[in-house]
Amino acid sequence: MAIRYETMDTQTENFIKSTINSFFPDLRNAVFELVCDTKKRKSGGRSVISKIEKPNEVLRFVSSNEENPEGIDYVLMLDKNVWNELSDNDKTRVVRHVLQHTDVDFEKEMPYGLRKPEVSTFYSEIEYNKDDPEWMERLETIADSLYTREDENE
């Protein structure tokens, strides 16, 4: 059985590093393992073009070395076949999207984490609510406030 993953080529690595430097300066010192997936991956019926994960403790241990004694902070994977067909603009979009999942908090012992997207919606809903794109967060704040008052009154 052939392994589906490959080491990322230098040109792609440099593209990712450039995107990090331009858009995500807090990630400049994060240690990434950059991997290409050579097979189609789907999740929830959708193609997965990029993915980022936090390594488990074993992977952190086996990836540690003198330069990075704590090992890697993230594993970033790209679908190699799709990546090779994309324009530079779309490559930038893919890398920026996957890096949006990162969460950096230098106050923590382990500053590099992951976060979920703020928005999960439908295209038509975006159009319906273009006058108030953060309506859901606003209503959640109202709900939290109401329930906080209820809890305080009990």
Image (cartoon, grey):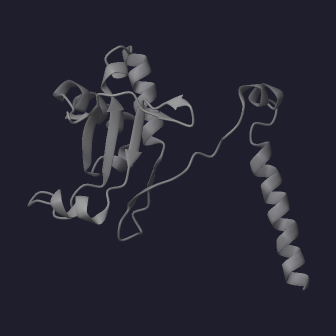
Image quarter hosting the N terminus? top left
Q: In which quarter of the image is residue 132?
A: top right
Residue under the point 27% across and 47% down:
32
Numbered marks: total: 0
Q: Is residue 66 above or below residue 91?
A: below
Q: In this view, does 37 lie above or below 144?
A: above
Residue under the point 75% across and 50% down:
137
Tell me: 124 left or right of 95: right
Image quarter hosting the C terminus? bottom right
Q: In the rendering, at what x and y percent does residue 40 appear?
A: 39, 27
Residue under the point 42% across and 29% down:
49
Residue extending furthest toward the left: 66
Tell me: 85 left or right of 141: left
Residue extending furthest toward the front: 1
Residue under the point 66% across and 40% down:
120
Residue extending furthest toward the bottom: 154
Nearest the camera: 91 or 132?
Answer: 91
Q: Quadrant of residue 110?
A: bottom left
Q: In this view, does 106 lie above or below 136?
A: below
Q: In the rendering, at what x and y percent does residue 60 appear?
A: 24, 61
Q: In the rendering, at what x and y percent does residue 28 appear?
A: 30, 46
Nearest the camera: 35 or 143?
Answer: 35
Q: In which quarter of the image is residue 13?
A: top left
Q: In the rendering, at what x and y percent does residue 140 appear?
A: 79, 56
